Amino acid sequence: MKNRLLKKWTLWRVARAGFALVFIVAGAGTGDYILVAGGVFLLFHALLNTCVTCAGGACNLPDQTSAKS
């Protein structure tokens, strides 16, 4: 779990986390709890680097750490 939280922070993952925080703050400021829920959902996926469409991790990319022959 620690590896999933701390590794592979790409630009898209940082953008998702940033948008999530903007949504949460904007929703809390205006009282729009649907926007807060969307922000929490996005933040959850950004932190864990998961995708809703990849049920069971079926579309995970292989690690780049393995040696290619």
Image (cartoon, rainbow, N blue to C red):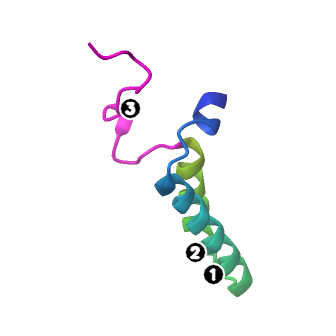
Q: For this view, does 58 lie left or right of residue 39?
A: left
The residue depicted at 65 percent of the width and 78 percent of the height is 27
Residue at the extreme bottom of the image, as rendered: 30
Q: Is residue 19 visible?
A: yes
The crowd level at tag 1 (other Cα within 10 Å; few <14, some 14-19, many 20+) is few
Residue under pointer 2: 35
Q: Amino acid at mark 1?
A: Asp
Q: As rendered, which of 27 and 14 lies closer to the eye?
A: 14
Give the alpha-carbon distance from disc 3 to disc 2, as whole Å.
27 Å
Q: Amino acid at mark 2?
A: Leu
Q: Is residue 4 magenta?
A: no
Q: Is residue 1 visible?
A: no
Residue under pointer 3: 56
The residue depicted at 72 percent of the width and 77 percent of the height is 28
Instruction: Kindly indicate whether the residue at mark 2 contacts the one at mark 3 (C-beta within 8 angstroms).
Output: no
The residue depicted at 65 percent of the width and 67 percent of the height is 21
Give the alpha-carbon distance from disc 1 to disc 2, as whole Å.
6 Å
Classify 42 as above or below 7: below
Give the alpha-carbon distance from disc 3 to disc 1, as whole Å.
32 Å
Q: Position of residue 42 (x, y in %)?
A: 54, 59
Q: Which residues are magenta?
A: 49-69
- First in sequence: mark 3 or mark 1? 1
Secondary structure that dominates the magenta span = loop
Element carrying mark 3: helix
Q: Position of residue 26 (x, y in %)?
A: 66, 80
Residue under pointer 1: 32
Element carrying mark 2: helix
The residue depicted at 54 percent of the width and 66 percent of the height is 38
Q: Is residue 50 magenta?
A: yes
